[in-house]
Amino acid sequence: MHANRHVPPVLQVAAAEDGQTVQAFLARRLGLSRRAAKNLLDERQVWVNRQLVWMAHHAVRRGDVVQTSVAEALPPRPQNIRVLIEDAHYLFVDKPAGVLTIGPDGAEERLRAQLALPQLRVVHRLDRDTSGCLMVARTAAACEAAVSVFKTRRVLKNYHAICVGHIKRRSSTIHEAIDGEAAVTHLTTLSSCPDATYVALRIETGRTHQIRIHLAGIRHPIVGDHQYGLKTARDPRLQQVGRQMLHATDIELPHPLLGGNLRAHSPLPADFRRCLRLFNL
């Protein structure tokens, strides 16, 4: 939507703009429609005096500093979703950030059109701003068989993430329940600095937003996670990241129909690698 737009990194509210809503301020200053300005707020991409703001009617005051995360916003979505591996029953695709798994213009809908497979169904979900391995079934029967395997916890799912702050321990396991259901996340530190940590994660359960909630719960939320992450950014680099730095790197499971194992790997996307460089990780 706005990834290719050049946006000034810092906007200061002038005396004549005192009292304007942040939506009106952004629309005028950035040459956006009111709807596009509202989208920036809805996507948690706007900071006022380093405080995350998402209410369109928030009033800005003279001297306020308004910033957006658009400098490192989501990359333009590719025309086609890349297929990593496939067989007669399943595909593993590389879901881009910024794309819903299911819904209008979501990965499932786009893949049906791209591959001319109207029966195609995604087997599991990734958050809109999480990139990486997504398993897709060619038919409803294949999907049902795969979902049954997922329920047995025989699916190995590995993720990479960049977290806020320095995690000292080399490895740890988080067992905090989510909505009353057991949830287990294994964490391994790959590299760290005083301000951020690059981690590998393996989840035994697949609760909604599990990794994001677990990392926020140990006070190391994912960089760019505006729902569970920091609402105040003392480090200006945090305001340069337009989406949560969470990537589904690997998935492995017993083949639901043919025996043997299915494996897929998704390399780190460009925006994730840029974020690693941003924090010298």
Image (cartoon, grey):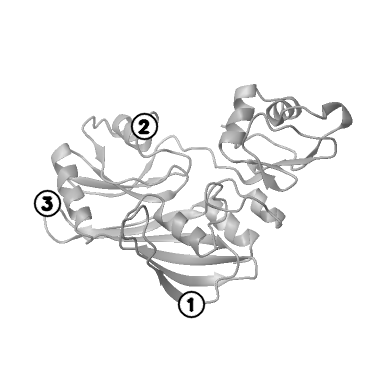
Q: Is residue 167 left or right of residue 140?
A: right
Q: Is residue 175 left or right of residue 7?
A: left
Which of the pair 86/142 is nearer the observer?
142
Q: Mark 1 highlights which residue?
A: 170
Residue 267 visible within the image: no
* Label 2 vs label 3, nearer the camera: 2
The three-letter code of the residue at mark 3 reads Leu
Q: Is residue 172 left or right of residue 144?
A: right
Which image quarter holds the C terminus? bottom right
N-term mark: 2 or 3: 2
Which image quarter: residue 149? bottom left
Q: Mark 2 highlights which residue?
A: 103
The three-letter code of the residue at mark 1 reads Arg
Give residue 268's mark: none
Give residue 257's mark: 3
Q: Helix or strand or loop: what does disc 1 sit on?
A: loop
N-term mark: 1 or 3: 1
Residue 178, percent from left and from top: 37, 55
Which of the pair 271/195 is nearer the observer?
195
Outermost residue on the left side: it is: 258
- As measured in the structure, the alpha-carbon distance from the residue carrying label 1 to the one carrying label 3 is 38 Å
- As measured in the structure, the alpha-carbon distance from the residue carrying label 2 to the one carrying label 3 is 27 Å
